[in-house]
Amino acid sequence: MRLQLAKKMKINEAKAYVAEKLGVTLEELCDVVTMSEIREEKGLGLAHVEPCAEANAGMAAKFKIQEILDIKINSVEKFRERAGL
Amino acid sequence: MEEKKFFTRMGDGSIVYMTENQIRADIEEGVKDAARRGKIDPLTDDEKEALYQIITMPGSIVGVEPGMQIVTSNDSGSDKISTKCGIPTSRDVNAMIHERLLGCDSVDIGYSDYNYKTVKGVAKREATVLKQALNQCTMPLFYGAMPNLGFYTKPDGPVENWAVLLPEGRIDEALKAQEEAVDHAVRDIVYVAEQMNDVGADAFMLDTSGAAGDADFLVALKATEIIRDRFPEMPVEIGMAGEFVLGMHGKLKYNDVRLAGLYPHKQVKLVEQAGASIFGVVVNTNSNRSFPWNMARVCTFVKACTDVAEIPVHANVGMGVCGLPMCENLPSDIVSRADKALVEICKIDGL
């Protein structure tokens, strides 16, 4: 979804881009078990899976997503401006 | 022995049982109807066979082949839990429910009176709700509403009502009124967009565009062009109101293309030119015809659209559009079949 918005990529191109950035196969990208581990490991947001206390969610996760996917996320940039980061 | 009949539904949601021959005949007729109206290619024999298999597939709920999963966007999503279901939750909480319980890929924060003319008066407060939600959610959050040009007519709007003027034969006044309304609506939308960009909206949604005809679609295109120029960091999605742009004005053009009468495969090209990131395609459901007939039309129109689209296409699959029945409680047997056909046959990028 982020790639469709940021780079106007169609679904297959977007999936290939994300898979490459995360170092997973297309099959793994669509697999909930693999992706739960990847999201947890890379801090990409996993707020509904315990232990929630250790997981990134919301803005913290979006900072990581922006960095790993090499895209600009408007909410992250505005937050950064406001926080003086 | 009686010929086997398959469970399916009519466009109003009522149950109907059809034989293989009846289903195939309706598919054929639906494809022809779309091809004739849109002046587009019909589905191939393989695609029609794939659609027949999806319609008659065993199981209440069907799914796409592994690896063909797509993403979702929506309209007035974050408001539906409170406004439609009557569950008293705030919209930032609704957005988190969509993310963490419903598994959505994005959602929009929208006002219960889902149009930009109304939102303009409370835009700063709406932006505050969006800002709270943006801090809490990981998935992309849109701000969304409809251009809804009809709201700009008297007595509660600033311009004369063209729906009153046209039957009276006051054609020039009706055209002028629509042109004036376009300017008002574009100004309101861009104003709201600025407030949402200020708090970091991940994207901006112009939903049900073209609902009041060609002038309404022109508003969406013009507003998108300005938004993309002034706030390039905020992508835009334009979702349509119907399969066909009604010529309420009839002479309006965008980049030298007349808007009246455009079908999805031509709508998407203008949406691209305006700078939008995603196009929300719509095909209307005929409630008097069967699901096979409706879905064959949908697949023909949507495939013609995705064939030429250079931006992602999300199919609008809600009540009364893209094959879904015209009823409030949508049956999952039809929803999942429509989704599967849209993904596997039409190659859509999202729902």
Image (tube, coloured by chain):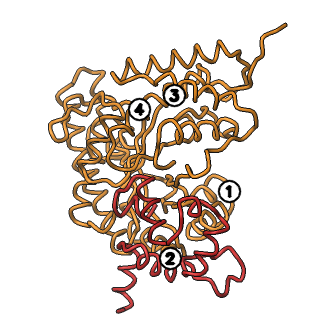
Chain colours: A red, B orange
**In the displayed image of the protein, which residue is found farthest to the top?**
B1
Crowding at dot 2, Cα within 10 Å, few <14 / some 14-19 / many 20+, comes out as: some
The mark lying in front, picked from 2 and 1, is 2
The mark lying in front, picked from 1 and 3, is 3
Q: Secondary structure at mark 3?
A: helix
Chain at tag 4: B
Percent position of residue B307, x then y: 37, 37
Q: Secondary structure at mark 4?
A: loop
Chain at tag 1: B
Residue at mark 3: B47
Residue at mark 2: B132
Residue at mark 1: B86
Query: Camera-side residue: B295 or B112?
Result: B295
Calculate the distance from the C-alpha at mark 4 to the C-alpha at mark 2: 36 Å
In the figure, residue A28 lies in which quadrant? bottom right
- Tag 1 and tag 3 share a subunit: yes
**In the displayed image of the protein, which residue is found farthest to the left?**
B256
| Amino acid at circle 1 | Gly
Residue B116 in sight: no
- Judge whether A51 appears above or below B114 on screen: below
Q: Residue at the spot x=41%, y=76% of the render?
A: A66
Calculate the distance from the C-alpha at mark 2 to the C-alpha at mark 1: 22 Å
Calculate the distance from the C-alpha at mark 1 to the C-alpha at mark 4: 31 Å
Which one is earlier in the sequence, the residue at label 2 or at label 1? 1
The mark lying in front, picked from 4 and 3, is 3
Calculate the distance from the C-alpha at mark 1 to the C-alpha at mark 3: 42 Å
- Judge whether B205 appears above or below B297 on screen: below
Q: Secondary structure at mark 2?
A: helix
Percent position of residue B205, x then y: 40, 55
